[in-house]
Image (spheres, helix red, strand yellow):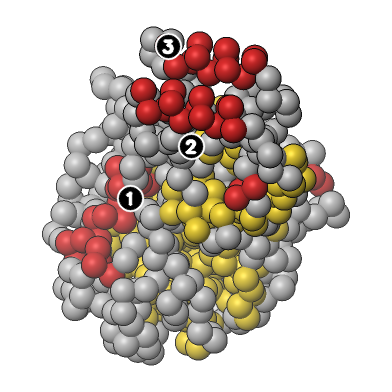
Amino acid sequence: MTPTTRHTPSPQRSESFPLAKIRSATTALLFVVAGALISAAAPSHAQCPLSLAPASDYAVGLNPVSVAVGDFNADGRPDLAVANTNNISILLGNVGGTFQPAVNYAAGTNPYSVTVGDFNADGRPDLAVANYGNALSIGNVSILLGNGDGTFATRVNYAAHNSPNSVAVGDFNADGRPDLAVANFNSHNVSILLGNANGTFVTRINYAVGGQPFFVAVGDFNTDGWPDLAVANFGGNTVSILRGNATGTFAAAVNYPVGFTPSSVAVGDFNADGRPDLAVANTSAPFAGGISNVSILLGNAPPNAGTFQPAVNYDVGREPRSVAVGDFNADGRPDLAVANGNFFGVLFSDNVSVLLGNGNGTFQVAVNYAAGFTPISVAVGDFNADGRPDLAVANQNSNTVSVLLTDNPPPAIIQQPASQIVQAGQNAALAITANGFGNTLTYQWRKNGIAVANGGNISGATSPTLTFTPALSGDTASYDVVVSAPACSGGSLVTTSTAAILTVTGTVCPADFNADGTLDPDDLADYITAFFAIPPGTGSDFNADGVTDPDDLADFITAFFAGCG
């Protein structure tokens, strides 16, 4: 199928970098290697639970098809740029991961892809937009220079080729200035536009790729220091690899088979060998009999660096449109987020699949999270400044962007402590069952709101079970327990149980050593046995002064012969 209308939108995985990383033109190279290095910024295997909070939706323009992340107003908080029909929405980020209402800027005809770079070396993020065009226009690329306060200058357009569908940023000629790579759907090629120091670009140079290129990504696949290109070819069911040279030129494309109708490609080091690998979202429209999945192509070692192993496929939702890389469970291993748009089908997914990486190039079964209607682009950024990646998803048919914050839920108490009534002198216990992050939980029981300490007849004050051996009348009180789990971004997450009332009735005879309710010679015999045991037995410190000594024996004998009256 050849998309010629808005009904075959191009997903765009955007780079998600803070402003500090795009302050100069030379930092544009970070966009080249971001996917391969994503695991380097994460802690090593300090795994957090995979959990995303329910989506929060923000209105944007009509038919949003691409979302990108950048700090457009230099406040240290990530903002969003969204490509809609004929304009770009900018949503400035607030503290806590929320966003301000969208402000729209004109672009070209049918924007299909938006990405971020500092094109005029002023330390302010700018935008590049691939405009697909229509029957009257073959499309072009718009550059919107950022003012640094969240606003943008009027667009300037540059020619690409027929139906520009995706745009990516890299420094292809090693001059420290960001350049552009543009996938042109209906001319079956990629345009390279080399950047000048002032935010302008030279005339395009085109390179042939596979049929109907839908998406372009940048990475150094042969580790020679020069950026290369990976292009997902919608009509060819392949990914084209174009090796870059220091002059900004590229070798002829080499194609690798993937799934059916690939629409997005992302770069990451999925098996921790220091070589970039590829993840490809295969839309696989059901009208063509395809199967929706993501293909993983692992990069080969020298002397075959820059080539890839055969694709291994993983199931996701219906018609995946976009794939992005992030470490969503903080274990230092790259994971995948996939927007499942299901534009062509009737069994709608309308969700995002997250596949946790195992660190060896394989992935776990997808876990799905609801987004808006027809999510077709996903980008990664830390929107609430908790040190963990969150997701922004462009929903084409609900005209919204969904923001899904990575959630670190507090411990869950599965079984609350139960109130009980016991006779003085009997043993008693209060218990809970809880789970949480890695089950590395800590406990603190409280009596009438004051922390309980172990000692005397009480044990387990910092465990799931608080034990009274035996229960005494003074133990009558309200008890709860504070359960804590480590937060993935530091600190603790806390849940407090409901209160349980322990009621101790009657009195206990201190000399009823075996707590059978009767004062008899067995108590005297049992105490003497405990007193002379090595080490002294439980309860031998009768006067509870911390030392088992003759005073305890004398006090016990006195109490015994005094009786329980």
- Give the image location of residue 458, x and y in percent: 53, 38
Residue 456: give its label.
2
Q: Tell me what residue is drawn at x 29 percent, y 32 percent.
A: 274
Q: Secondary structure at mark 1?
A: helix
Q: What is the distance, in whole Å, between disc 2 and disc 1 at their CAs? A: 59 Å
Q: Left or right: 32 with respect to 283?
A: left
**Alpha-carbon span between mark 2 and mark 3:** 19 Å
Q: Position of residue 32 (x, y in %)?
A: 30, 51
Whether residue 217 is visible, yes or no, is yes
Q: Are marks 2 and 3 in contact (CB under 8 Å)?
A: no
Please tell me whether residue 242 is drawn above or below residue 498 in the rendered image.
above
| Element type where label 3 sits in the image | helix
Q: Quadrant of residue 124?
A: bottom left
Residue 199, horizontal then vertical, whole percent: 24, 76
Q: Nearer the viewer, residue 260 or 148?
A: 148
Q: Residue at x 55, y 32 (%)?
A: 559
| Of marks 2 and 1, the one in the foreground | 2
Q: Amino acid at mark 3?
A: Phe
Quadrant of the drawing holding the C terminus: top right
